[in-house]
């Protein structure tokens, strides 16, 4: 979403829809039962970022930093 924000609204919207779809699939997966609150919170913050950060002042850059930390940890554990 961040990549397409200033370039193509249609592609940014598609990326947002896909992110919501993936989060919803993750929430529906019983393997994540112990982490549902955190996953639902990320979904809420993603929606806030798309709405301009009205409720929680969330920016896409904030979420990018948040997920980068998880990606780095996952890569290290390989």
Image (cartoon, rainbow, N blue to C red):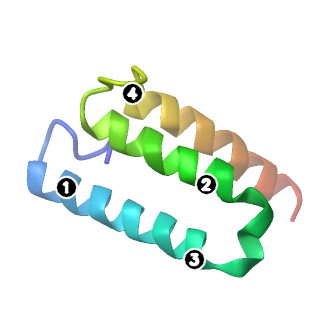
Q: Decide which of tag 4 and tag 1 comes sooner along the chain.
A: 1
Q: Which residue is mark 3?
A: 28
Front tag of 4 and 3: 3
Q: Residue at x 43, y 23 (%)?
A: 56
Q: Residues within 10 Å of mark 2 (few under 14, many from 20)?
A: some
Near-viewer residue (40 or 58): 40
Q: Position of residue 15 (x, y in %)?
A: 29, 59
Q: Residue furthest right?
A: 77
Front tag of 3 and 1: 3
Q: Secondary structure at mark 3?
A: helix
Q: Residue at x 75, y 69 (%)?
A: 33
Q: Secondary structure at mark 1?
A: helix
Q: Position of residue 76 (x, y in %)?
A: 85, 53
Q: Which residue is mark 1?
A: 13
From this view, report whether residue 74 is shown above or below residue 73: below
Q: Residue at x 50, y 38 (%)?
A: 64
Q: Which mark is residue 59?
A: 4
Near-viewer residue (78 or 29): 29
Q: Decide which of tag 2 and tag 3 comes sooner along the chain.
A: 3
Q: Which residue is mark 2?
A: 39
- Residue 29 occupies quadrant: bottom right
Q: Decide which of tag 4 and tag 3 comes sooner along the chain.
A: 3
Front tag of 2 and 1: 2
25 vs 11, left or right, is right
- Residue 19 occupies quadrant: bottom left
């Amino acid at each position: 979403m961040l990549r397409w924000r200033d370039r193509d609204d249609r592609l940014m919207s598609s990326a947002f829809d896909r992110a919501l779809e993936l989060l919803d699939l993750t929430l529906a997966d019983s393997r994540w039962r112990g982490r549902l609150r955190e996953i639902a919170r990320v979904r809420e913050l993603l929606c806030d970022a798309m709405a301009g950060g009205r409720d929680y002042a969330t920016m896409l850059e904030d979420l990018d930093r948040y997920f980068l930390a998880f990606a780095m940890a996952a890569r290290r554990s390989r």
